[in-house]
Image (spheres, rainbow, N blue to C red):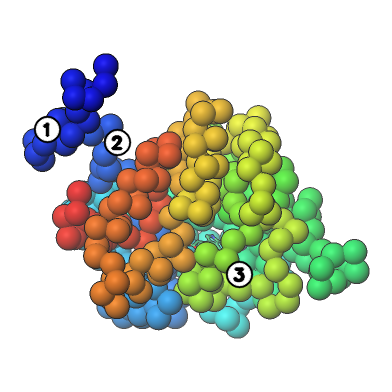
Amino acid sequence: MQFPTTRMRRLRKNSNIRDIVRETELDKKDLIYPIFFKQDLEGSQKEEIPSLPGEFRYSLESGIEFAKKLEDAGLKSIIVFGVPLEDDKDEIASPDYADSGIVQKAIRELKKQTDLVVISDVCLCQYTSHGHCGLIKENDDYDSGIEILNDESLEYIAKVALSHARAGADIVAPSDMMDGRVGAIRKTLDENGFYNVEIMSYSAKYASAFYEPFRQAACSSPHKGDRKSYQMDPGNAIEAIRECELDVIEGCDFLMVKPALPYLDVVRMVRDEFMLPLVAYNVSGEYAMIMAAIEKGFLTERAITESLLSIKRAGADLIITNFAPYVLFNELI
Ligand code: PBG
Ligand code: ZN
């Protein structure tokens, strides 16, 4: 059947019709909020993050207060990042697995004071003196003469995950991109009785320019070299399937593609290939771009919900996004 019998515009006639035929919708429960807890902030202190307009680094107390407000507005889950003292950082990320660490404290308080699903980011980069996601060694075969050691790093990454599980994390989310990390974490968690703690693996994490605002926020840039020898090359999509496949074999519970908007093709491929819940990380650069354009009046806030919707339409079940507060408090969904 064709025009004039068929008229596509019939189904777009008014908002009631459009509402009942819409294929994909955003829901509050789809959003996961990334929150920064900073060690040296006290009481009700919070610190603006210049690279992420409208976002803050929180003290333990102010962060918990904010999390409660988000929960009241409909948020279901939160992912916790820590910003430790510069002076405490060392070659082996010691403040990362200290029981008294800022993330461990934040996890305990979130579990005590809210019903949110508490996810913890597991990585070494915010805690190492060199800013890499694993331990390092000089090796001229690598760019900038630095090798990021794989197998040696696994032990430390598993240690971080275990300390987050002990603090009460529901889900641990390794973002380091070392080979074998999901298996190493699963083994350590199981050996210590945490067989019910889930692993949300940053399975296909690209070496992306879109993390820049986050690195400024978390003070986690590598001091020398880059992350290209462990994070994925932006030209590769098929390789993302191999990464996901290995994570599934090693026992992860959620897959993730990161960033989201520049990699929607990868989100769709992973969705079609695997049966696991799929997370997409709408990263800091994606947030900063749209917020900067809104501030200048070049875009309206509809760009926020439209881009989040596109991530869901591509196949993501859950979206980690700095936009969560903006969307919830302004009732955009
Ligand atoms: C640390 C980490 C990064 C992000 C999440 N965890 C940065 C990086 O890999 O350098 C980026 C998040 C964002 O940009 O919003 N491994
Ligand atoms: Zn890292």
Which of the two discs, 2 and 3, sits closer to the camera?
Answer: 2
Residue underneath mark 3: 127
Taking the spot 35% from the left edge, 52% from the top edge, the residue there is 307
Q: Residue furthest bottom?
A: 87
Q: Is residue 105 left or right of residue 302?
A: right
Q: Could you say which is closer to the camera, residue 1 or residue 235?
A: 1
Please determine whether, in this image, residue 191 is positioned above or below residue 142: above
What amino acid does circle 3 point to?
A: Tyr
How busy is the neighbourhood of tag 3: few (under 14 within 10 Å), some, or many (20 plus)? many
Q: Give me the disc on residue 24.
A: 2
The residues bearing labels 2 and 3 have C-alpha atoms spaced at a distance of 39 Å
Provide residue 282's location: percent of width, then percent of height: 43, 55
How busy is the neighbourhood of tag 1: few (under 14 within 10 Å), some, or many (20 plus)? few
Which of the two discs, 1 and 2, labels the residue nearer the N terminus? Answer: 1
Q: Secondary structure at mark 3?
A: loop
Q: Could you say which is closer to the camera, residue 124 or residue 7?
A: 7
What amino acid does circle 2 point to?
A: Thr
Provide residue 218's location: percent of width, then percent of height: 50, 72
How busy is the neighbourhood of tag 2: few (under 14 within 10 Å), some, or many (20 plus)? few
